[in-house]
C-alpha cells in the first residue's frame, strides 16, 4: 500500500533500497545490484537539489558522490567515472556512455572480489583505460555514504529543508494483508 514516505524506511527498511541491493548481491545478480546502487545514488542525490528545482541532473549526482562516497579514495575512480558508468548501466545495460565516448569518464568493469576476471576471449575487447571495480566495494561505499548523508541531514538545517521538501515525491510502500475471498457453492 502506498504511504507517506519515510526516508529511513525507504533506504534501510526491510523492503528498502539497500535491502534490494543486498538481495541482488546474495543472488549474484551483478548488473542488477550495480543498477540498484546507481539508482539509490540518483534518488539520494536528487534530495539535495534546491527546493525550487524540479529535476535533478549530472552535477547534483556528481556533487553528492564527491561529498559522500569520495570515490577517488574509496573506489580509486572519479565521480565522473561513476556518473558515466551509471549512464551506461541504466540507459543501455552496458559500459558505454556519452561521457565515456567523449573521454570524460573511464569505463568501469565490475567483478566480485573472489570472482573470476573478465573472459580474455570476449568478442569485444575491454577498453584499454577500463578500471575494475569490486561490487562489494561499491556496495560498501554506498552504505557508508547513505549513513553519513542521513546523519548530515540532522545537523544541516538547509539540507534538512531541501530533503524534507523533496522527500514527499518519493514512493514508499508497506505490505498489506490480502483479504481471502471465499465463494459459497
Image (cartoon, helix red, strand yellow):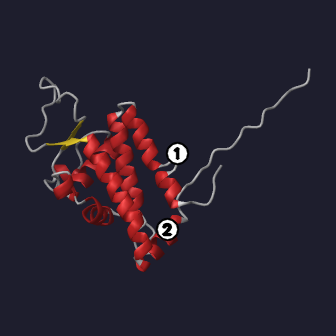
Pointer 2: what residue? 166
Q: Residue furthest top?
A: 185
Point out the image quarter for the C terminus. top right
Mark 2 burial class by Cα count in 10 Å: few <14, some 14-19, many 20+: some
Where, by quadrant of the figure, is residue 28 drawn? top left
> Residue at 13% of width from left, 53% of height from top?
103
User: Where's residue 24, x and y in %?
Assistant: 40, 36
User: Where's residue 145, x and y in %?
Assistant: 33, 58
Pointer 1: what residue? 15
Image height of 28 relative to 21, above or below? above
**Which secondary structure, mark 2?**
helix
| Mark found first going from the N terminus, 1 or 2 | 1
Q: Residue furthest bottom?
A: 157
Viewer-side residue, 6 vs 89: 6
> Residue at 36% of width from left, 44% of height from top?
35
Can the viewer see residue 83 in this picture?
yes
| Whole-number angstrom distance, CA of label 1 to CA of label 2 | 21 Å
Q: Nearer the viewer, mark 1 or mark 2?
A: 1
User: Where's residue 117, x and y in %?
Assistant: 16, 30
Amino acid at each position: 500500500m502506498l504511504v507517506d514516505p519515510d526516508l529511513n524506511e525507504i533506504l534501510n527498511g526491510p523492503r528498502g533500497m539497500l535491502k534490494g541491493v543486498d538481495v541482488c548481491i546474495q543472488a549474484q545478480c551483478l548488473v542488477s545490484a550495480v543498477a540498484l546502487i546507481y539508482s539509490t545514488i540518483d534518488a539520494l542525490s536528487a534530495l539535495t537539489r534546491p527546493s525550487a528545482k524540479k529535476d535533478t541532473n549530472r552535477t547534483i549526482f556528481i556533487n553528492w558522490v564527491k561529498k559522500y562516497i569520495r570515490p577517488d579514495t574509496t573506489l580509486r575512480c572519479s565521480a565522473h567515472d561513476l556518473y558515466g558508468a551509471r549512464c551506461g548501466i541504466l540507459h543501455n545495460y552496458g559500459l558505454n556512455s556519452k561521457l565515456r565516448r567523449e573521454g570524460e569518464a573511464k569505463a568501469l568493469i565490475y567483478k566480485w572480489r573472489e570472482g573470476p576476471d573478465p573472459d580474455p576471449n570476449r568478442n569485444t575487447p575491454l577498453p584499454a583505460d577500463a578500471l575494475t571495480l569490486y561490487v562489494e566495494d561499491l556496495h560498501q561505499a554506498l552504505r557508508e555514504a547513505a549513513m553519513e548523508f542521513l546523519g548530515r541531514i540532522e545537523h544541516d538545517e538547509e539540507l534538512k529543508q531541501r530533503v524534507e521538501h523533496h522527500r514527499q515525491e518519493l514512493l514508499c510502500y508497506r505490505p498489506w494483508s490480502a483479504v481471502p475471498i471465499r465463494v459459497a457453492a
